[in-house]
Image: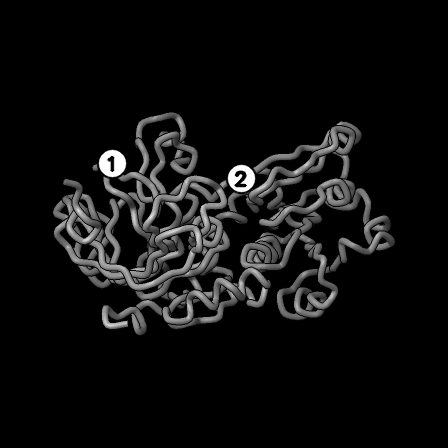
Amino acid sequence: MAKSPAEEHPNKAFGWAARDTSGVLSPFNFSRRETGDNDVAFKVLYCGICHSDLHMLKNEWGNTIYPIVPGHEIAGEVTEVGSKVKNFKVGDRVGVGCMVGSCRSCDSCSNDLENYCPKMILTYSAKDSDGTITYGGYSDCMVANEHFIVRIPDSIPLHAGAPLLCAGITVYSPLRYYGLDKPGMKIGVVGLGGLGHVAVKFAKALGAKVTVISTSPNKKQEAIERLGADSFLVSRDQEQMQAAKGTLDGIIDTVSASHPLLPLLSLVKTHGKFVLVGAPEKPLEVPAFALIGGRKTLSGSCIGGIKETQEMIDFAAKHNITADVEVIPIADVNTAMERMIKQDVKYRFVIDIGNTMKPST
């Protein structure tokens, strides 16, 4: 007889889970494993709501395991460390991002790219090494191997730093890897949501000239005056798009909904790079001549390895980069999901787990 989620492991845990493709979250009792020799256990204080949480809740990517406790922008305080843990102690400020395990021996893992390991274990809705299902940060506690724990610098408030563990690394990594991190480069950011707004901040801190590309003209003032973008393009304005053709060294496309790529590819210079980091549920159409004509590169990027994630958050601390967040109680999480679909958030919802996630809720 299979054990229930509340009985699989010895340590009681409490969170909010969805049980089916409605994606509606409600209170859920489950369990976490004992803190092993190489594990770090921590009290979850804040957890960001990523757009991928919404896709997963509704099984839009086809790989959801129910019941699902989402959340992979998790920040909190260490409560226990295993006997062999070297880098963390009780009381440390820490976080967990999108993964909690990998094989640690393949080429990707050997090169600090655990995020591309074929056996990478996602923080939630995945099979862990012991065969049980992983549960994410919409919960009161977390335990993970020390290798997958990130230290959050004291200067970064936990509520505003939590989204960097997914949104931050998702945009930082391609800026670095594709050489779009040189001062004076002209970088476009498509979409001004959870990923886009931190992409602007990181690109500016790296010395780039940043153009925000959006379907919403009303975001222009916010993009330039508050986030520091240098210019703004309305992607539906053909005159603006025509005038900007061939002006950008690279583009980070953060949009998770279906959208036309052809007009955006035209903005990139010869030899320019167009990087997808958003994950629409349906395939995007790519006209071949849009790439052939300028020897342009269309590529993708998925979060980053643990070493680079730590580098990213240390860089964020040095340059005073945090996410712009709206902190909500767990009781408002379903409403927040509905608002996120309508893009009614600037720019990341973060759940106040520490103060509002109670077993009595």
C-alpha span from label 2 to label 1: 25 Å
Quadrant for residue 272, please give it: top right
Quadrant for residue 202, please give it: bottom right
Q: Considering depth in this image, is 37 or 10 the residue closer to the camera?
A: 10
The quarter of the image holding the C terminus is bottom left
**In this rendering, position of residue 290 left or right of residue 44:** right
Q: From the top left corner, tell me how far across and down residue 332 is, in percent.
A: 42, 71
Discs 2, 1 touching: Cβ within 8 Å: no
Q: From the top left corner, tell me how far across and down residue 186 is, in percent.
A: 71, 49
Q: Residues within 10 Å of mark 2 (few under 14, many from 20)?
A: some
Q: Which mark is residue 129?
A: 1
- At x 62%, y 43%, the residue is 180
What is the three-letter code of the residue carrying label 1? Ser
Q: Residues within 10 Å of mark 1 (few under 14, many from 20)?
A: few
- At x 47%, y 54%, the residue is 54
The structure's colour scheme is one colour
Q: Which residue is mark 2?
A: 301
- At x 72%, y 68%, the residue is 218
- At x 23%, y 53%, the residue is 88
User: What kind of element bears circle 2?
Assistant: loop
270, above or below 9, in the image: above
Which mark's residue is nearer the viewer, 2 or 1? 1
Is residue 175 among what the camera can see? no
Q: Does label 2 or label 1 sit earlier along the sequence?
A: 1
The quarter of the image holding the N terminus is top left
Q: From the top left corner, tell me how far across and down residue 140 is, in percent.
A: 26, 62
**In this rendering, position of residue 79 left or right of residue 123:** left
